[in-house]
Amino acid sequence: MSLRETAADQMKAAMKSQAPDAKLRVSTLRMLMAELKNAEIAKRGELSQDEELAVVAREVKRRGEAAQEYAKADRDDLADKEKAEAEILKEFLPEQLSEAEVETIVADAIAETGASSPRDMGRVMGAVMPKLKGRADGKLVNALVARKLGAS
């Protein structure tokens, strides 16, 4: 079952639900389905599972950034809404790796590529990111690679 079908099923269940967060859940799932449809239109074809996960990850990232901006502007009500939407969207992403697991993968990639200086960061990131595919935040990976290569 595709991610879009799963979201549609969950949206139908949320519409029938009497839960306090049902309206937020319905609107968030509608937005997700619209984004997936827009991505299909842009691609002019069906999305692969990786592409669907990339759309979800992008939307989670957008919600996180928006929540930070709202918090800076002292709009905690809107920041909380964005955070709640991000949590709903995270249900569709694979389980995130711990920092220790990511650090192990980064160390292996540095050994594979033979990287030794901060100039090799691009090569290491290129080797690491396909292995992580949505299971770790890019900022965390970037920081770990920079620290390991001494670019701090």
Image (cartoon, helix red, strand yellow):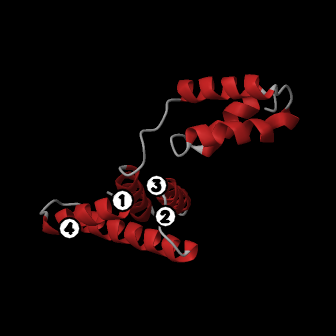
What is the distance, in whole Å, between disc 4 and disc 2 at their CAs? 22 Å
Give coordinates of residue 137: x percent, y percent: 57, 43
Query: Which of the numbered marks, if any, corresponds to residue 47?
Result: 2
- Circle 1/circle 2 CB separation < 8 Å: yes
Determine the secondary structure under disc 2. Answer: loop
Badge 2, how many Cα within 10 Å: few under 14, some, many 20+?
Answer: some
Residue at far front of view: 45
Viewer-proximal residue among 114 and 27: 114
Viewer-proximal residue among 28 and 132: 132
Determine the secondary structure under disc 4. Answer: helix
Name the residue beneath numbered marker 3: 49
- Circle 2/circle 3 CB separation < 8 Å: yes
Badge 1, how many Cα within 10 Å: few under 14, some, many 20+?
Answer: few
What is the three-letter code of the residue carrying label 2?
Answer: Leu
What is the three-letter code of the residue carrying label 3?
Answer: Gln
Q: Is residue 135 above or below residue 100?
A: below
What is the three-letter code of the residue carrying label 1?
Answer: Ser
What is the distance, in whole Å, between disc 4 and disc 3 at their CAs? 22 Å
Q: Earlier in the sequence, mark 4 or mark 2?
A: 4
Q: Earlier in the sequence, mark 4 or mark 3?
A: 4
Name the residue beneath numbered marker 1: 2
